[in-house]
Amino acid sequence: MKKNLHHPAESSDEISVSESLAWAKKFQFGDANLWSLEIELLLGEVIGVSRESLYAWPNRVVKSEQWALFADCVKRLNAGEPLEYVIGFCEFWSLKFKVNSSVLIPRPDTELLVGAALALPVPTHELIEVLDLGTGSGVVGLSLAYEKPSWQISAVDNSPAALEVAADNAGALGLNNVRLLEGDWYKNLPLPIESNDGYRIILANPPYLTKEDAHLSGSSLSWEPIRALVSENNGFADLYRIIRIAKKLLNLEGWLLLEHGYNQRVGVENFLLDSGFVDVKCLRDVAGNARVSVARHTKFI
């Protein structure tokens, strides 16, 4: 239950770390353990120390301006806003990425998409051009660009606001092998920069939820951009469209990687096979759910 928040010792200019945490814990929203973790991470971010340091120096004074920021952020958490939006960043692939309400909050499961791309049997001595569809904050494409400086990443999104976030992240990571472009899988898709016969890898984490999905209410998803979550045709519309367009943009022996819902494996696999893809396999996330499908393009089918 959300509560009205009042500052402790409102007339005081000094409040300690331990007092700040004790105050914030009174306004728990949701799971108690998760709330404690989030306010500790939040306070550490506000005063510029690690979570561990909060307990090593519990009497450290929180400055008045830091306290004001912390209190405001606790109010946002108490209203149900996700921690990642409140602090403005998240970690993905051991990298720090800016996020805001223009983009989805990256999930650990999506790291499977990055790992699968890095594990593909592609030549090490050739230019590898990669198309990242629906890049959002850029976590997938930029993680690949960071790991593979010799790869050329084209990251596409239909949201100018999302592309601004991705551009900030590319700049923060110092990447020069990424181009960010406005478009989607229905129009304005870019051709490779140097390759004349198509991309070596196309990957996407498209919308794949249905409008009726229970996860869309009462969770952090209710704060996230609905356009990046929901798809028509029982969640398959965007997945199927990407498979169709990938046939035109992949080179011979190129690879397509798609994140999808745990219950969409069969539908995605069948559509890939019907579309002429081969070597189709599905990778499972840490919970054992079908999460990423990988398939190889061939023009001989």
Image (cartoon, rainbow, N blue to C red):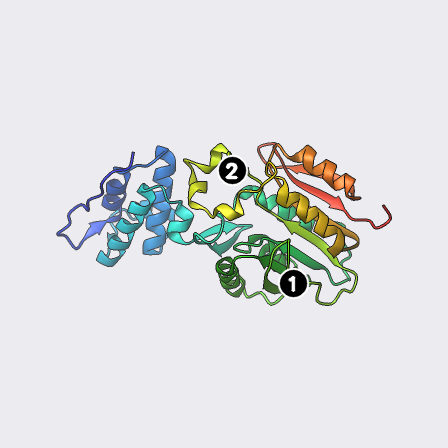
Q: Which residue lies furthest to the left in this view?
A: 11
Split into 4 quadrants, where in the image is the C terminus? Answer: top right
x and y, in percent, of residue 20 in the image: 25, 46
Image quarter for residue 196?
Answer: bottom right
Picture residue at 52% right of the left edge, 57% below the top:
159
Mark 2, residue position: 211
Q: Where is residue 133 in the image (x, y as percent from the top left)?
A: 62, 53
Query: Which of disc 2 and disc 1 is earlier in sequence?
Result: 1
Q: Do the residues labelled 1 and 2 touch (CB within 8 Å)?
A: no
- Residue in the image at 32% along x and 47% along y: 76
Q: Is residue 198 visible?
A: yes
In this rendering, is residue 41 above or below 28?
below
Assess disc 1: are there few (<14), some (14-19) or many (≥20) residues with their C-alpha within 10 Å of its C-alpha: few
Type of amino acid under label 2: Lys
Sort mark 2 into few (<14), some (14-19) or many (20+) by Cα contacts within 10 Å.
some
The percent position of residue 242, horizontal first and vertical second, equals: 67, 48
Label 2 residue SS = loop
For the residue pair 159 and 105, the one nearer the viewer reads as: 159
| Depth order, front residue of 82/247 | 247
Q: Where is residue 166 in the image (x, y as percent from the top left)?
A: 52, 59
Quadrant of the image containing the N terminus: top left
Question: Circle 1 sits on which residue?
Answer: 149
User: Residue flagged by tag 1: what amino acid is it?
Assistant: Pro
Q: Is mark 1 on a helix, strand or loop?
A: loop
Closest to the observer, 201 or 270: 270
Disc count in the image? 2
